[in-house]
Image (spheres, rainbow, N blue to C red):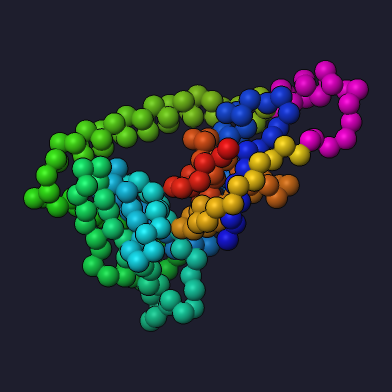
């Protein structure tokens, strides 16, 4: 499991464009090697945490990837650790023990409903609506920027190279490493570029192998 994060350095190219390009490439390269669980909460926006270890998976809806391990397989089913959902108001609910995945490598849906008697329901509903609006806006932005993104970055890089054709040698090593644990524990590990360097999600968080942003590690 990767335990380092860093800020990628691409000379002269705006960081936001780099993030969007890397995210697009990573999404296209995903494979079906994992069992996946999409955790859904009502209302949306609850923090999903693994029971026992308190490892944060992310805010629902969020998809976690599990690499099948022989010791966790029984009768064709993969048994994964249960989770707890906690809303902004403090309301909580937990799965009843481990979660059984019995239909092979695919994406499963696991739904957790907020306790009806927990106070401050309106707070959680407002927060869920806020998250939905942000995601809709982000989807529109990505849709606009996604068209021709790779060609745009390539042309921009070529222009910079032409302007600096009197320089040679490799790009400077400007990576800033910070030790951390569990950046993408439930998302297949940290995604790397063709040079073996860790990548950033366009949201500013570490990019995981399944295309999701890390729930705990930001790019610095």
Image quadrant containing the N terminus: bottom right
In the rendered structure, the answer to whether residue 124 lies left or right of residue 133 reads left
Q: Choose between 77 and 217: the one closer to the eye.
A: 217
Identify the residue at image location x=23%, y=67%: 96
- The residue most toward the bottom is 75
Identify the residue at image location x=91%, y=22%: 166
The percent position of residue 207, horizontal first and vertical second, equals 54, 45
Image quadrant containing the C terminus: top right
The percent position of residue 217, horizontal first and vertical second, equals 50, 46
- The residue most toward the front is 179
- 74 up-or-down from 46: above or below: below
Q: Choose between 98 and 154: the one closer to the eye.
A: 98
- The residue most toward the top is 163
- 212 up-or-down from 203: above or below: below
In the rendered structure, the answer to whether residue 78 lies left or right of residue 211 reads left
- The residue most toward the left is 117
- 80 up-or-down from 116: above or below: below
Identify the residue at image location x=35%, y=66%: 52
Identify the residue at image location x=53%, y=62%: 33
What residue range appears in magenta? 154-172
Q: Quadrant of residue 131?
A: top left
In the rendered structure, the answer to whether residue 32 lies left or right of residue 166 reads left
The percent position of residue 165, horizontal first and vertical second, equals 88, 23
The percent position of residue 219, horizontal first and vertical second, equals 56, 39
Q: Choose between 33 and 83: the one closer to the eye.
A: 83
Residue 43 shows in the view = no
Question: How many numbered marks, from 0 up?
Answer: 0
Residue 161 shows in the view = yes
Q: Is residue 82 magenta?
A: no
């Amino acid at each position: 499991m990767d335990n380092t994060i860093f800020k990628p350095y691409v000379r002269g190219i705006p960081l936001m464009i780099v993030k969007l390009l890397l995210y697009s490439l990573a999404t296209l390269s995903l494979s079906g090697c994992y069992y996946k669980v999409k955790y859904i909460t009502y209302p949306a926006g609850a923090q999903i945490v693994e029971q026992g270890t308190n490892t944060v998976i992310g805010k629902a809806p969020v998809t976690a990837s599990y690499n099948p391990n022989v010791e966790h397989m029984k009768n064709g089913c993969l048994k994964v650790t249960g989770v707890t959902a906690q809303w902004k108001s403090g309301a909580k609910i937990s799965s009843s023990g481990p979660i059984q995945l019995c239909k092979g490598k695919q994406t499963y849906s696991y739904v957790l409903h907020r306790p009806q008697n927990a106070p401050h329901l309106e707070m959680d509903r407002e927060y869920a609506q806020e998250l939905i609006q942000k995601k809709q806006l982000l989807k529109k932005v990505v849709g606009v920027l996604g068209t021709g993104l790779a060609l745009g970055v390539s042309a921009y890089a070529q222009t910079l190279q032409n302007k600096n054709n009197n320089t040679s040698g490799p790009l400077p090593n400007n990576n800033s490493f910070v030790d951390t644990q569990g950046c993408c524990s439930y998302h297949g590990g940290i995604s790397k570029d063709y040079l073996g360097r860790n990548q950033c999600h366009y949201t500013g968080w570490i990019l995981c192998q399944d295309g999701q942003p890390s729930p705990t590690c930001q790019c610095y």
